[in-house]
Each structure stands twice: as C-alpha cells, then as structure tokens.
Image (tube, rainbow, N blue to C red):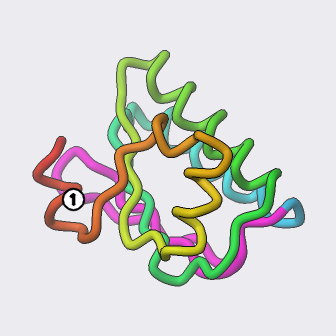
Amino acid sequence: MTIKQEKINDITLVTLNGELIMENTHRVREAFKKILMEKGVKALIDFDHVPFVDSSGIALLIEIVQIFAKAGGRMCLCHVNKKIIAVFEITKVHKLFSIFDSHEDALRSF
C-alpha cells in the first residue's frame, strides 16, 4: 500500500493505494499519528484506489475517526467503492463516517 498526503488549506488529503488489510494497517496508523501531531485535525481519505478493506482495516478506521473526534477534529472518506460501502453498512460502521462521492463535496463539508 502506498500513502500519499497533501495539504488543501487546513485539510490533509490522504490518498491510499492498495488493500486496507492487516498487513498495511500499521503504516496507515503511523501516517495519521503524524497528521495529528502536526495539528492536523481535519482529514479526507481518498479510497479511489482501495479495492478491499478487511476487518482490521475497518477497526483502524474506527480508531482513527475516534481519535480525530477526541482531538476536536473530523475525518471524511471519499470515492469509496460500492463493495466497501456494503461492508460498512453490514457492520453498521457507515454511521461513524461522513462518506462523499468526490473530493469537492467532502472539502465543502468541512
């Protein structure tokens, strides 16, 4: 998995490329720890190139959204494919995330 970060005003756009599975969660967790240490309390995760999320990936996303909330921040997701959204809905975690179709819609929500 590759993780790319860029700043758009005060929002950190995190673009993931690859499966969000147990083998990759530690790298994603570390990336978000750095974002929070840099006073970045707004993040948008682009899932355009994430074909699959396993249970450890879901657990990580829950952990990250809770950490952002405790820090007074917010995390959104965009470009999430229908299979992943279905998994989020089955596990009821879709209620924890703000999910948008595009970067523009997500950025406007902040």
Which quadrant would the N terminus be assigned to in this image?
bottom right
Q: Which residue lies furthest to the left in this view?
A: 108
Residue at figure coordinates x 55%, y 26% from the top left: 66
Going by the numbered disc 1, the residue's amino acid type is Ile
- Please give left or right for residue 81 compared with residue 54 in the image: left
> The C terminus lies in which quarter of the figure?
top left
Rendering coords of residue 99 (x, y %): 36, 54
Foreground of the two, 37 or 80? 80
Q: Is residue 7 magenta?
A: yes
Which image quadrant is residue 101 in? bottom left
Residue 26 visible in the displayed image: no
* Depicted 13 relative to depicted 98: above or below: below
Q: How many marks?
A: 1
Residue pictured at 59% horizontal, 40% vertical: 92
Question: In percent of the image, x 16 and y 52: which residue is there?
Answer: 9
Q: What element carries label 1?
A: strand
- Judging by the rendered image, the residue that carries numbered circle 1 is 8
| Residue occupying the far right of the picture | 23
Q: What is the magenta range?
A: 1-21
The image shows residue 41, relative to residue 11, as above or below, that is above
Note whether 59 is above or below 25 in the view shown. Answer: above
18 part of magenta stretch = yes
Residue nearest the viewer, comparing 81 with 60: 81
Identify the residue at image location x=46%, y=69%. Answer: 80
Q: Where is residue 107 in the image (x, y as percent from the top left)?
A: 18, 55
Left or right of 103, for residue 31: right
